[in-house]
Image (cartoon, rainbow, N blue to C red):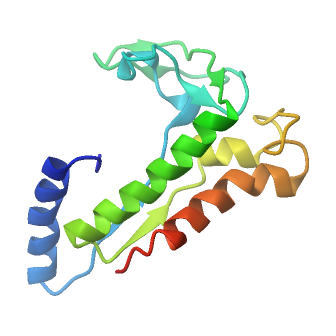
Amino acid sequence: HIRTAEEVAAWKTIVDRVHAKGSVIYLQLWHMGRQTHSSFHPATGTIAAPSAIKMGGGQTKTAAKEHVEPETPTAMTEEEIRTTVADYAAAAKLAAEAGFDGVEVHSANGYLLDTFLQSSTNTRTDAYGGSPENRFRMLKEVLEAIIASDTVY
């Protein structure tokens, strides 16, 4: 996590130690999407994805580390997408404040951004679904928001 001043301070301690050894460190930004469990989101009790398509096979873990069947996610609204895009940009700014040398936007392995890219997990009919260009839209908006935030590394 990197959402609060306390988390920035904690990360800064780690980043400073890495830099003191002459190395660089990047923060990977990602969102678990439908691979998470609702117990990690007590405020809403839901998990987010481009479409309400349950993860197939396997299990997921609860906040109590119990293995359970995956849940069916809630399809994100366009407002939730905009909020999540802004969250990525805010996290990138906080990473810069903590002294990270850069960020990596994770968009693979079935996590949120990857599920927007895939036609099998994104069956939306709005501006975020359908064509490859539309399915790429959220990732593109995340990258543009980080660039527009004037975050300097």
Q: Tell me if residue 108 comes above or below residue 36 in the rendering.
A: below
The one of 149 and 15 positioned closer to us in this rendering: 149
Q: Could one spot residue 149 in this view of the protein?
A: yes
Q: Residue at x 46, y 68 (%)?
A: 149
Q: How many marks?
A: 0
Q: Tell me if residue 66 comes above or below residue 95 in the rendering.
A: above
Residue 130, image x, y percentages: 90, 43
Q: Could one spot residue 110 in this view of the protein?
A: no
Q: Examine the image and state in which quarter residue 28 appears.
A: bottom left
Residue 73, image x, y percentages: 62, 21
The one of 4 and 63 positioned closer to us in this rendering: 4
| Lateral position of residue 147 relative to residue 103, left or right | right
Q: Examine the image and state in which quarter residue 82 appears.
A: top right
| Lateral position of residue 103 relative to residue 12, left or right | right
Q: Residue at x 8, y 64 (%)?
A: 13
Q: Residue at x 29, y 47 (%)?
A: 3
The one of 133 and 121 positioned closer to us in this rendering: 133
Q: Residue at x 34, y 14 (%)?
A: 66
Q: Tell me if residue 27 comes above or below residue 18 in the rendering.
A: above
Residue 22, image x, y percentages: 16, 87
Q: Tell me if residue 76 comes above or below residue 57 in the rendering.
A: below
Residue 37, image x, y percentages: 46, 21
